[in-house]
Amino acid sequence: MAIFDKQLAIKKLTERNALLPCHRCGHKSFGIVDGVTSYSLIDDQNMIGSVMVGGPSLPVLHVFCENCGAVTSHSLGILELLPKDDENGK
Ligand SMILES: [Zn+2]
């Protein structure tokens, strides 16, 4: 089972007018990457470069340009696409 619903993601991005052509090449066809990335969040500069286990995170999905491959990330939390048992992301 996918971590988020791609059709719902497209609906959410459309509702929020995330519809501009590629910021790199101007192409208008995009895809959504399978899976997500969860960025570890830190508020202490001494943690830069550390391996993080647990703690706060920012889960994002990635939209890619089908022409040049430029990738743009969108917060799952902002798009209301987080699984119901994971409300940690923003
Ligand atoms: Zn492009």
Image (tube, rainbow, N blue to C red):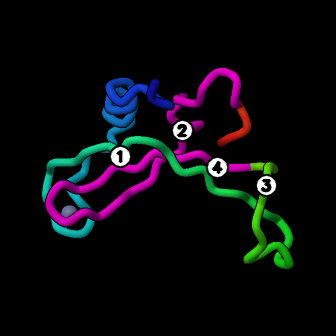
Residue count near mark 1 (Cα–Cα under 10 Å), binned few <14, some 14–19, many ≥20: few
* Picture quadrant of ligand 1: bottom left
**Residue that label 2 marks:** 76
The x and y percentages for residue 46 are 86, 78
**Residue that label 3 marks:** 53
Q: Nearer the viewer, residue 43 or 50?
A: 50
- Seen at 77% across and 61% down, the residue is 52
**Residue that label 4 marks:** 58
**Residue that label 1 marks:** 33
- Seen at 70% across and 57% down, the residue is 40
Residue occupying the far top of the picture? 84
Q: CA distance from mark 2 to mark 3?
A: 20 Å
Q: CA distance from mark 1 to mark 3?
A: 24 Å
Residue count near mark 2 (Cα–Cα under 10 Å), binned few <14, some 14–19, many ≥20: many
Q: Over which residues does the magenta segment extend?
A: 57-86
- Seen at 23% across and 59% down, the residue is 22
Q: Element type at marker 3? A: loop
Mark nearest the camera among 3 and 4 is: 3
Q: Nearer the viewer, residue 66 or 35?
A: 35
Residue 40 relative to residue 21: left or right: right
Q: Element type at marker 1? A: loop
Residue 71 relative to residue 37: left or right: left
Q: Is residue 47 above or below residue 76?
A: below
Under mark 2, the amino acid is Leu
First along the sequence among labels 1 and 3: 1
Q: Is residue 80 above or below residue 58?
A: above
The x and y percentages for residue 58 are 64, 49
First along the sequence among labels 2 and 4: 4
- Asked if the beta carbon under badge 4 is closer than 8 A to the nearest atom of ligand 1, the reply is no
